[in-house]
Every structure is written in structure tokens, then in C-alpha cells.
């Protein structure tokens, strides 16, 4: 029997096509009455695929009595009720590591853009300001600067290695120091922000990191400091960030993630020292392909061995 797989996420079409080739794929959003569909057809669905941005809540897990595995397209777990799944013995698979390079590259792209004003300079040239002789402000030097990384996990470490290529001095903050890391651990986030020229945020999302970066941390970073966020919008107090930028209390920001995606505070559009991207840090052909491959591998492995190849650890801290 071909297993029934319920798609509740936002998945790229090539992945949907490949899932359809291997499984009986049913798409919840395509049903005129999703709740009624679950009541009538939920029994017998053994697998669910989702994406990190959409996730899966406990109610949806409860609605599927025969669910055995959830596979997510992405690494973030802040929207997946992993505990509810694990309580029921449901395996959860995700796509760690394969996106480290691209997310780290994107963090560096935002950092370089904010510091060297690439997007701002592009606007200056396109608007014809150069031949008009309008002044263009000086940027900030990246090479040799101090980089504070908030969250030294898989992606944080990759960012740290990128930064070494720019001869940056790297320190990091996380709840535990990483035993094999060659960079200094700073247990006090405020101290890290005071020390850093650039602060890159790459913790996990969820309640434990909500508003970790607040007005006090931004003031510690200071008027010449730049913030980059490629983690989750929830990690930063967005209202405090907008105020700090408007009031010149920090030097600039490069943001890929926001509190209420796809909505971005319009006040940020007025600020020339801010670079905004629409949650695209992992969005390259190669990485999205690797993520799709891993979703498929997780599912295929589950239905042949009973285990996914990239399981979310049972004791993972999401809150
Ligand atoms: P990871 O390996 O699990 O690393 C998470 C890091 O966050 C760890 O160093 C952890 O250290 C730290 N952390 C967790 N809670 C913390 C807290 N309260 N205070 C300080 N540090 C804390 O995860 P990853 O694979 O590097 O991914 C990190 C996150 O990036 C994902 O969860 C996802 O939300 C985001 N992401 C975004 C994009 C994008 O497109 N922008 C793409 C991929 C991933 P401790 O546990 O020791 O504190
Ligand atoms: C993707 C992400 O944008 O992996 C994550 O946690 O945020 C990104 O890689 C997302 O998975 C697509 O839904």
C-alpha cells in the first residue's frame, strides 16, 4: 500500500512533484473544508510534510490518529509542536546542516551590505545622485572588526568561520559554552553587545529566545554598532529595534526575518541604514534542492526502516 502523506506546508513545486510520485499526497489547503476533511479522511494518514515557516500544531497532530512521522522542510522548530509529536511516539524529521552554508553566506551578505552600504549606494547610482554630486556617506570597515554571534549552533559556527576570512575577532553568546569552539564564549549578552561592532543573531526561535534582543541590548551595541538577524523575527523586540534605528541609537541593521511575516514595519522602509530581505537566507537553487532531497530521504527512510535520517532529537530544547 502506498502511504498517505498530508501536505500542510508551503513546499516548492519540484518537491511536491517528487512526493506525488512516491506517495499518496493529499494537500490540506486544497480542501474546501480542511477541518471536515480531517474528520472524514484523517484516519489512515501516516505522514505529514510541512515547512518550518508553517509548522504543525498539537490540534493538527491530534486530528490524525494514525500519524507516525512529520517531516519538515527547514531547520527551525519554533512552529512545530515537537513535544506533542514525541509524546505520541511520532518521529519528527527536519533538514539541519544542508542549509548552513547559504544561511551563513546570507548573514555575511547582510553584514557587508549594511557596513559598506551596497544597497544604499545602488539606490544612489540609479537615482542619478552621482553626477549630481550629492554626498555619499562613509561606511564602516568590516575586515578586522569585532563580531558577536548570538547562538553558536550549526549555522552560528559557519558564520564564525566566514568571519575569520575577514580577519574579524569573533566572540559568541549562548546559554552553554561550546566545548570545541575556538571563539570566546561570553555568558553575558549585554557584555557581548558592548564589545561588538557587529552583532549577528542566529539562535533558535520560540519562547526561550523571545525578545532576547531588546532595547537594552541595542543600546549596548551602540550608535556605531550594526545588527544582523537571520534567526527568527521573534528573537528581536521589533518595536524597540525600529525606535533604536530611528533615533540613531544603533548604526544599522540587516534583517531577513520579522515578527509578522510577510509584513515588515513600514517605518523601516524610510531608513537608509537598513537592509531588508524577505526570509531568503536558505533560498538558493542548490540549498533548496538539498533540503527537498532530505525531506524525501527522511520519508523514504521512515517507510523502509521506521526511522528518518535526520530526526529532531528527543530532548531538543524548543522552549
Ligand atoms: P542550532 O544548531 O540548534 O543552534 C541554535 C543556537 O541557539 C545554539 O547555539 C543555542 O545554544 C542557541 N540558543 C538557543 N536558545 C538560546 C537562548 N535562550 N539564549 C542564547 N542562545 C540560545 O540551530 P541552527 O541550525 O544553527 O539554526 C538556528 C536557527 O536559524 C533555526 O532555529 C531557525 O530559526 C533559523 N534559520 C533561519 C533561516 C532563514 O532563512 N533566515 C534559515 C535556517 C535557519 P544554547 O542551547 O547553548 O543556548
Ligand atoms: C526556510 C528556515 O525559509 O529552515 C528554516 O528554519 O527558516 C528557512 O530555511 C524555510 O524552511 C522555508 O519554509
Image (cartoon, rainbow, N blue to C red):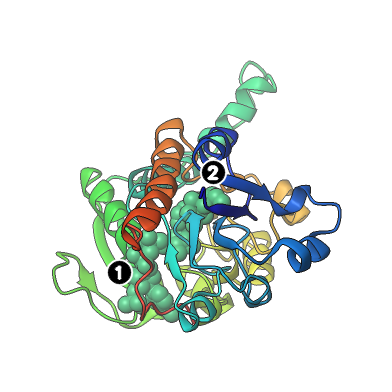
- Visible in this render: residue 228? no
Q: Would you call the spot at circle 1 few (<14 residues within 10 Å), some (14-19), or many (20 or more)?
A: many
SS state under label 2: loop
| Left or right of 131 in this view: 88 | left
Q: Nearer the viewer, residue 311 or 259?
A: 311
Q: Is mark 1 within 8 Å of ligand 1?
A: yes
> In screen coordinates, is 94 left or right of 270?
left
Q: Is residue 115 above or below residue 66?
A: above
Disc 1 is placed on an element classified as strand
Q: Is residue 185 above or below residue 272?
A: below
Residue at 44%, 66% (x, y): give it. 92
**Label 1 sits on residue:** 172
Looking at the image, which residue sits at the far front?
A: 1
Drawn side of residue 146 relative to residue 95, left or right: left
Asked if ligand 1 lies within 8 A of label 2, the reply is yes
Quadrant position of residue 79: bottom right
Please name the residue shown 49% across and 82% down the image. 319
Ranked by sequence position, the earlier of labels 2 and 1 is 1
Q: Is residue 240 above or below residue 73?
A: below
Q: Which residue is mark 2?
A: 280
Q: Marks 2/1: CA distance?
A: 24 Å
Residue 254, percent from left and from top: 53, 51
Q: Nearer the viewer, mark 2 or mark 1?
A: 2
Viewer-proximal residue, 123 or 281?
Answer: 281
Apparent side of residue 141 relative to residue 222 in the rendered image (left or right): left
Amino acid at each position: 500500500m502506498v502511504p498517505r502523506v498530508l501536505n500542510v506546508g508551503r513546499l516548492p513545486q519540484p518537491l511536491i512533484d517528487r512526493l506525488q510520485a512516491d506517495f499518496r499526497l493529499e494537500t490540506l489547503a486544497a480542501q474546501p473544508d480542511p477541518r471536515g476533511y480531517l474528520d472524514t479522511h484523517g484516519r489512515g494518514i501516516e505522514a505529514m510534510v510541512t515547512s518550518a515557516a508553517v509548522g504543525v500544531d498539537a490540534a493538527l497532530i491530534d486530528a490524525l490518529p494514525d500519524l507516525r512521522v512529520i517531516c519538515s522542510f527547514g531547520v527551525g522548530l519554533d512552529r512545530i509542536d515537537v513535544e506533542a509529536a514525541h509524546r505520541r511516539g511520532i518521529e519528527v524529521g527536519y533538514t539541519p546542516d544542508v542549509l548552513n552554508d547559504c544561511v551563513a553566506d546570507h548573514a555575511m551578505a547582510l553584514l557587508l551590505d549594511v557596513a559598506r552600504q551596497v544597497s544604499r549606494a545602488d539606490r544612489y547610482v540609479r537615482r542619478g545622485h552621482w553626477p549630481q554630486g550629492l554626498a555619499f556617506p562613509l561606511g564602516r570597515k568590516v575586515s578586522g572588526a569585532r563580531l558577536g554571534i548570538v547562538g553558536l549552533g550549526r549555522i552560528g559556527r559557519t558564520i564564525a568561520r566566514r568571519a575569520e576570512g575577514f580577519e574579524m575577532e569573533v566572540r559568541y553568546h549562548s546559554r552553554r559554552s561550546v566545548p570545541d569552539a575556538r571563539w570566546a564564549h561570553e555568558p553575558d549578552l549585554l557584555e557581548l553587545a558592548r564589545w561588538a561592532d557587529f552583532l549577528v543573531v542566529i539562535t533558535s526561535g520560540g519562547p526561550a529566545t523571545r525578545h532576547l534582543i531588546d532595547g537594552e541590548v541595542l543600546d549596548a551595541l551602540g550608535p556605531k554598532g550594526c545588527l544582523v538577524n537571520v534567526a527568527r523575527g521573534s528573537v528581536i523586540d521589533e518595536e524597540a529595534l525600529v525606535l533604536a534605528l530611528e533615533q540613531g541609537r544603533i548604526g544599522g541593521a540587516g534583517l531577513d526575518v520579522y515578527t509578522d511575516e510577510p509584513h515588515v514595519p513600514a517605518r523601516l522602509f524610510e531608513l537608509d541604514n537598513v537592509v531588508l530581505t524577505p526570509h531568503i537566507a536558505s533560498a538558493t537553487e542548490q540549498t533548496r534542492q538539498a533540503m527537498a532531497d532530505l525531506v524525501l530521504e527522511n520519508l523514504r527512510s521512515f517507510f523502509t526502516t521506521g526511522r528518518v535520517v535526520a530526526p529532531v532529537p528527543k530532548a531538543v530544547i524548543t522552549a
